[in-house]
Image (cartoon, rainbow, N blue to C red):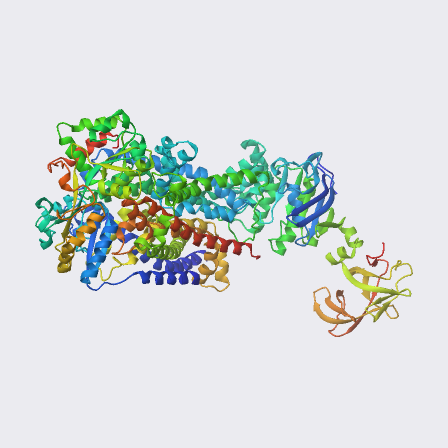
């Protein structure tokens, strides 16, 4: 009987797998294969498979690689550590307690994602360096701190902590407070209850989101390059970018170095998988529970203070720096009254350089990428969670891999793949190649989030739907999707925010004549028009944030409705 | 009532109020629970019973009044004194069990002991003993997720009693189980409580559970205690028409007094004994189920018609409709056909007259 | 699920609006000023009716894209910020021979059989007069105590022109590596590419860029920034921007027409307007021209990797 049931489920999950696998092959496997082929065959771009492995020796004989790898691991670990330190408590508080202004914090913590990392780094530089905004306003100069290893960790943590925050808060809300209450009555004080009950239960979600953070941290180029390179702290991505940034271009070398990053990510993935399999709990059973949030009582003020501090550092400071730069006529004029001006905004509104077209394209790309990754990610996670096999484990890693490879290398892979002459049709040089790129790069968010949420849902809920007459698809859509939708929507908002401002892959892949927000900003920076670029950033952040704000309001209304 | 053991403790709730925003959930409730006594808090959802339990547990802070467990003041809204739940030395069984899914059954049960600083070696026999009390000896190493609902609830019970708390709290522990299991577990819990002699507070919306378990039952409605009494006394002497109606103790009819006779809906006239109708013009008649009998000829009778009749093995469950409309459930030893007229008499010595509240009583 | 679908359709529709097909067209891959290529394209289309598709990035990104799509080349014209591109592509036989009739007034060292220069930038010292430091006149001034911890320089590993400056200066026996050792001693920082080196000087965190790209600094100055462009007494290097037509181009006539347009008086005036030096000697500009500058020679035989490694070692950025 039990065997029969399992067989039945496998058969029907197979239908979803039959959809997911080819889609992942097109989105992920195809470009990644070409990166790997490029690493092996140096002349792949010209369509030649001559001299395989010829670049292996001289690429890896570079004595700096060892140090870069170590630095990369150090940076990734440090960012994971500090992101956990900041975001796990925030997420727990948000998920279990009645935090005043909860919706506001959710929106605020999405802002770091809407700010491109290179802009955030520039914002911090302009705020903290000598004669920076902080120095001009208060006489305090924190340049020493900013341009150090811990400065990089600080800025990167503020960029990526929302990944952990949203994962933990959604999971916590699903788990609810009753396990903690049981522990409190059993004699555990709040600290013990947290470490013995709450933390272990949230471990899968925390581990999954920290894995994402690690992957993002080892892949990020702009921040370490802008802040720590001057003090001699270089990472693998620096080396990869160098191989792609100046004469002679070294595609195979970049591809080979990328394989080290993928290797590091595989180790992190294995660690995460080990943590998660050892603690695979179904906390969401069919038993109804109250979604009551615990009041904070005397802790209200310190907790709100904590949220406000992180929102201030993660969202307000970078946005303020961007806005101040956009609102001053010249940088060298500083924060003087006669230097404030709206000329940069006027230039944007006058549609200089196709600003409006860029905004429209970016929003469209963000929405499309969010919708597609949401659907594909949910289905992939479903296949991975419900069918535990080596194949599904590989599928799982596959959706993480692109996140660990620098965007520029993924872009190279996409070009190599989609310009193959034997293809009957190609999205290359159309806007859809950008959609493919964003799906490839950003699929990990919905997959990780949906994966963590699915692991908490017992199969009984689905079984109940099946018994009630729903087929596998209907049960999935009507039961599973609504239950994991808070997590998936959170992930889709992240995807939207990132896709609407992605630069690194976009530069290389942009179809002829396409303008996006990030390209527009970057071109202004390249020409030295920092103020104009920052004005565009301000407008883009404001417009990009309206969609998450609307979604948050809508979800709150849905939450507040009875039943 | 079982003799209080050395560990059991009285619980005193004095003038407890709880407000959520503008909503008053509990309104100056007093409750005295003797050491070793089991009190059931019985009420519909929204009656405030669960809130009262959570206040005793320390899972919420009262906005008014005080709670003492033994000599210790655990919460006092006036002084702001508040003892967190872990310092109250309680056991608690939750409606949804709340077994920690990442711990084995034995680790779940051993957790309260661990929190009390008991060494692993000393914990083990206690855990085994607690599990054997709920007949789950063989399940110590299982994960909670692999157990049935009834088994999970017994693990929760073992976890609540393992540290021999002075007070044990139950929050509708059986409401997620089927009737058969429920009846079974009620007996188990009652037996266990009597054997251990713990003070217990048991929240339920099910009368039969409350009556089966409790030494005294507190009936709650709208954030206040309507009556607290032994189950037998509640049934025999409900303090108000509300209690009688809530407990579905029997027939409740609105009536008027007219020259020594009771008029029910204009058509029915009954003649109760002389001192039955004390004073007032209007009120409610309450007749316990066991005080209603088929009438013999000549009795002053309540005229009804049979609406529906179902054979129940040892008799017939019949729905009777009074001439002026109200419906009454009646159990008859003999067959009554649908549509047949049935006259009933009332054993007046067991019936009560509740005069309307605008007159003093 | 239907919400997803609706969202998807809506976004797809909005994307479809932005995609357009071109009839008669030429595709230009270009490094350098976005405004310039857009003005040139608009002028060219107005004159000839031929659409121009533009891909604009840094030289490195452009080269990466060209190399990755080598199996299926998309570009007709490449405009690079580095002469190496022209020499390298020429040697590989990737370029179409073409001499524009408008190249007559382009000096010989700015054109070849299959390439011709669009415009030229030079490296300079960019100095913030509000920094409270004395105005520098030569590279070696920046090793002085006045500029301690106040100098930035673009990373030669990320900027081709910065590399050429290093190569040219160290080859000069009077200057050599001692200059860079002195700069390192004086706490000069190497924060990244060109923009990253200029920004701290604009805000005042630093005072001087060693090897700033001149036209970007001129543009900043025109936008009101407090910045002076100084061409050092001992000379500097220039970065000519070669234009070339790819052999694989399917639109060779249109591509030739585009090159002609860029080299026309109108096109060269646009180049001059962006503060690049026009490659034609008969076009006026509001800035010093090649003839006004002392140009340092770069030996093409210099060992690039060794030079970069030595530089990185001196500044501790390995």
x and y percentages locating residue B125 in the rendered image: 58, 35
Q: Give the left or right position of residue C141, taking residue B309 as reference.
A: left
Can the viewer see residue A240? no
Q: Is residue C178 left or right of residue A555?
A: left
Q: Is residue A516 left or right of residue C298?
A: right
Query: Residue placed at 81% from the left, 61% from the top?
Result: B284
Q: Position of residue A45 (x, y in %)?
A: 18, 51
- Quarter residue A243 falls in: top left
- In front of the other: A225 or A489: A225
Quarter that holds the N terminus of chain B: top right
Q: Whole-percent x and y of residue A342?
A: 38, 48
Total tally of numbered discs in the picture: 0
Residue A398 drawn above or below residue A331: below
User: Going by the picture, which residue comes out furthest to the bottom?
Assistant: B339
Residue C201, percent across and down?
A: 30, 36
Viewer-closest of C90 and C291: C291
In which quadrant is the C terminus of chain B drawn? bottom right
Q: Nearer the viewer, residue A121 or A535?
A: A535
Report the front residue among A348 and A492: A348
Q: Can I make out residue A262 in this image? A: yes
């Amino acid at each position: 009987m039990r065997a029969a049931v399992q067989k039945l489920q496998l058969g029907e999950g197979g239908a979803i797998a039959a959809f997911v696998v080819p889609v992942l092959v097109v989105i992920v496997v195809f470009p990644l294969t070409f990166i790997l082929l490029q690493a092996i065959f140096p002349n792949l771009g010209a369509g030649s498979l001559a001299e395989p492995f010829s670049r292996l020796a001289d690429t890896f004989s570079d004595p700096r690689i060892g140090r870069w790898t170590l630095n990369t691991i150090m940076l990734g670990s440090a960012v994971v550590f500090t992101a956990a330190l900041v975001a796990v408590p925030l997420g727990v508080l948000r998920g279990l307690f009645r935090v005043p202004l909860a919706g506001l914090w959710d929106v605020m913590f999405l802002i770091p994602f809407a700010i491109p990392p290179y802009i955030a780094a520039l914002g911090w530089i302009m705020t903290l360096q000598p004669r920076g905004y902080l120095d001009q306003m208060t006489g305090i100069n924190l340049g020493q701190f900013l341009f150090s290893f811990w400065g990089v960790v600080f800025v990167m943590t503020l960029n990526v902590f929302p990944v952990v925050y949203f994962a933990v808060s959604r999971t916590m809300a699903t788990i609810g407070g009753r396990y903690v209450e049981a522990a409190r009555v059993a004699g555990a004080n709040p600290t013990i209850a947290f470490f013995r009950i709450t933390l272990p239960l949230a471990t899968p979600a925390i581990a999954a989101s920290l894995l994402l953070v690690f992957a993002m941290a080892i892949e990020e180029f702009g921040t370490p390059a802008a802040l720590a390179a001057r003090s001699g702290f270089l990472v693998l991505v620096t080396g990869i970018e160098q191989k792609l940034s100046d004469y002679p271009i070294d595609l195979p070398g970049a591809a080979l170095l990328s394989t080290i990053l993928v290797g590091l990510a595989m180790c992190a993935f294995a660690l995460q998988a080990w943590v998660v399999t050892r603690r695979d709990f179904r906390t969401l059973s069919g038993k109804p529970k109250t979604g009551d949030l615990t009041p904070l009582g005397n802790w209200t003020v310190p907790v709100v203070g904590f949220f406000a501090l992180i929102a201030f550092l993660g969202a307000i400071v970078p946005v303020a720096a961007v806005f101040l730069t956009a609102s001053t006529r010249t940088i060298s004029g500083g924060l003087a009254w006669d230097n404030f001006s709206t000329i940069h905004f006027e230039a944007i509104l006058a549609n200089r350089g196709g600003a409006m077209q860029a905004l429209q394209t970016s929003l469209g790309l963000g929405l499309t990428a969010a919708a597609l990754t949401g659907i594909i990610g949910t289905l992939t996670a479903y296949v991975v969670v419900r069918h535990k096999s080596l194949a599904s484990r590989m599928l799982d890693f596959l959706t993480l891999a692109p996140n660990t490879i620098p965007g520029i290398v993924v872009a190279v892979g996409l070009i190599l793949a989609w310009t193959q002459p034997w293809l009957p049709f190609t999205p290359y040089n159309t806007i859809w190649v950008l959609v493919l790129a964003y799906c490839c790069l950003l699929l990990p968010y919905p997959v990780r989030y949906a994966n963590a949420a699915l692991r908490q849902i017992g199969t009984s809920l689905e079984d109940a739907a099946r018994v009630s007459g729903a087929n596998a698809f209907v049960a999935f859509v009507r039961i599973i999707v609504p239950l994991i939708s808070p997590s998936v929507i959170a992930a889709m908002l992240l995807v939207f925010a990132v896709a609407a401002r992605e630069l690194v892959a976009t530069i290389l892949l942009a179809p002829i004549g396409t303008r996006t927000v990030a390209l527009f900003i970057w071109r202004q920076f390249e020409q030295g028009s920092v103020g104009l670029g920052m004005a565009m950033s301000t407008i883009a952040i404001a417009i990009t944030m309206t969609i998450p704000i609307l979604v948050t309001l809508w979800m709150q209304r849905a939450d507040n409705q009875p039943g | 009532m079982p003799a209080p053991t050395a560990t059991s403790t009285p619980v005193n709730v004095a003038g407890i109020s709880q407000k959520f925003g503008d909503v008053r959930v509990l309104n100056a409730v007093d409750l005295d629970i003797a050491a070793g006594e089991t009190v059931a808090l019985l009420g519909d959802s929204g009656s405030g019973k669960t809130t009262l339990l959570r206040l005793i547990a320390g899972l919420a802070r009262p906005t008014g009044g005080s709670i003492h467990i033994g000599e210790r003041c655990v919460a006092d809204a006036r002084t702001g004194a508040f003892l967190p739940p872990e310092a109250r030395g309680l056991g608690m069984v939750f409606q949804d069990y709340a077994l920690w899914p990442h711990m084995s059954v034995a680790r779940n049960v051993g957790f309260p002991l661990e929190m009390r600083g008991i060494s692993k070696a000393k914990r083990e026999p206690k855990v085994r003993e607690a599990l054997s009390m709920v007949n789950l000896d063989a399940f110590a190493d299982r994960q909670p997720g692999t157990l049935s609902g009834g088994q999970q609830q017994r693990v929760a019970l073992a976890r609540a009693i393992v540290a021999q708390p002075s007070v044990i709290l139950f929050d509708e522990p059986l409401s997620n189980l089927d009737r058969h299991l429920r009846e079974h577990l009620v007996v188990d819990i009652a037996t266990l409580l009597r054997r251990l002699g713990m003070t217990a507070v048991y929240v339920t919306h099910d009368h039969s559970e409350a009556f089966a378990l409790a030494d005294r039952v507190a009936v709650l409605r709208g954030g206040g205690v309507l009556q607290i009494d032994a189950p037998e006394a509640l049934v025999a002497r409900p303090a108000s028409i509300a209690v009688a109606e809530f407990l579905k103790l029997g027939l409740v009819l609105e009536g008027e007094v007219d020259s020594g006779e009771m008029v029910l809906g204009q058509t029915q006239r009954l003649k109760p004994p002389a001192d039955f109708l004390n004073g007032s013009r209007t009120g409610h008649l309450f007749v316990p189920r066991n005080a209603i009998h088929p009438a013999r000829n000549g009795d002053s009778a309540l005229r009804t018609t049979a609406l529906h009749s179902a054979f129940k093995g040892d008799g017939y469950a019949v729905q009777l409709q009074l001439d002026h409309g109200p419906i009454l459930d009646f159990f008859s030893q003999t067959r009554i056909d649908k549509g047949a007229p049935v006259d009933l008499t009332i054993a007046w010595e067991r019936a009560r007259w509740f005069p309307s509240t605008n007159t003093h009583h | 699920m239907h919400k997803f679908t609706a969202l998807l359709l809506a976004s797809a529709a909005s994307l479809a609006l932005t995609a357009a097909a071109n009839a008669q067209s030429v595709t230009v891959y270009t490094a350098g000023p976005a405004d310039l290529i857009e003005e040139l394209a608009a002028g060219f289309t107005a004159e000839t009716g031929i659409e121009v598709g533009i891909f604009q990035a840094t030289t490195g990104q452009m080269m990466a894209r060209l190399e990755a799509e080598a199996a299926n080349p998309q570009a007709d014209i490449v405009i690079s910020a580095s002469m190496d591109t022209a020499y390298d592509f020429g040697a590989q036989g990737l370029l179409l021979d073409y001499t524009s009739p408008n190249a007559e007034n382009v000096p010989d060292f700015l054109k070849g059989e299959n390439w011709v220069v669009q415009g030229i930038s030079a490296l300079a010292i960019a100095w913030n007069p509000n920094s409270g430091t004395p105005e520098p006149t030569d590279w070696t001034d920046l090793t002085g105590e006045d500029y301690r911890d106040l100098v930035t320089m673009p990373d030669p590993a990320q900027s081709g022109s910065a590399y050429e400056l290093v190569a040219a200066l160290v080859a000069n026996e009077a200057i050599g590596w001692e200059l860079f050792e002195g700069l390192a001693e004086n706490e000069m920082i190497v924060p990244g590419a060109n923009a990253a080196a200029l920004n701290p000087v604009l805000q005042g965190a630093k005072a001087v860029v060693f090897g700033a790209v001149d036209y970007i600094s001129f543009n900043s100055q025109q936008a009101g920034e407090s910045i002076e462009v100084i061409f050092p007494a001992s000379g500097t290097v220039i970065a000519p921007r070669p234009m070339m037509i790819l052999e694989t181009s399917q639109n060779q006539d249109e591509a030739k027409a585009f090159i002609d347009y860029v080299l026309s008086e109108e096109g060269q005036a646009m180049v001059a307007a962006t503060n690049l030096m026009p490659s034609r000697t008969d076009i006026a500009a509001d800035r010093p021209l090649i003839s006004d500058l002392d140009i340092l020679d770069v030996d093409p035989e210099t060992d690039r990797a060794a030079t970069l490694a030595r530089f990185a070692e001196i500044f501790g950025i390995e």
